[in-house]
Amino acid sequence: MINYLDFFSKKFMNDKIAIESLSMDLYRTAIGLHRGSYKMAKRFSDEAILRCGEIKKDNVKPYFIKILQGIEDCLSNQPRARTAEDALMYSVLCKNYVKKFLS
């Protein structure tokens, strides 16, 4: 039983950390856009796009793969009026996913 738990925790721990980091990067992007600090927002949105690539698609639920695609679409375009709101929404969705499935 202990070996199974070790395998499970090693397999999903990297995804958990990556998704939590993605959530924080999205939150910082939203805060930067809201404050008008576009340089900060750009830096954290670039980090968030990199984090999306770190997450193994085989280890997450199919609906979360769609969320990751939405994040990449949202951040790869030019910032618009609701980009900050979208980034904040995706940040909360990532936190909820980790809390429900990876904790």
Image (cartoon, rainbow, N blue to C red):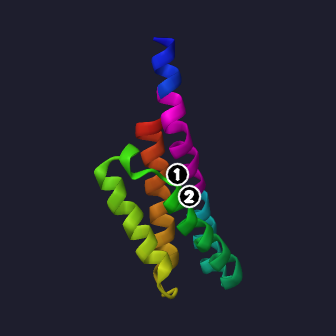
Residue 7 placement (x, y as % from top left): 49, 25
Work out whether 97 lies above or below 33. above
Boundaries of the magenta span: 8-22
Is residue 103 at least partly visible in the picture?
no
Work out whether 3 lies above or below 55. above
Is residue 44 at least partly visible in the picture?
yes
* Residue in view at x 52 percent, y 76 percent: 84
Determine which residue is flagged by label 1: 19
Asked if the residue under mark 2 is in contact with the one under mark 1, i.e. CB atoms within 8 Å, the reply is yes
Work out whether 16 lies above or below 103. below
Residue 23 placement (x, y as % from top left): 55, 57
Name the side, left or right, on which 81 lies relative to 43: left
| Three-letter amino acid code at the position of disc 1 | Ile
Find residue 22 and name its label: 2
* Residue in view at x 60 percent, y 78 percent: 34
Which sits in the foreground, 50 or 101? 50
Which quadrant of the rendered structure holds the N terminus?
top left
| Three-letter amino acid code at the position of disc 2 | Leu
Which sits in the foreground, 31 or 4? 4
Residue 18 placement (x, y as % from top left): 56, 51
Q: Dot 2: what SS?
A: helix
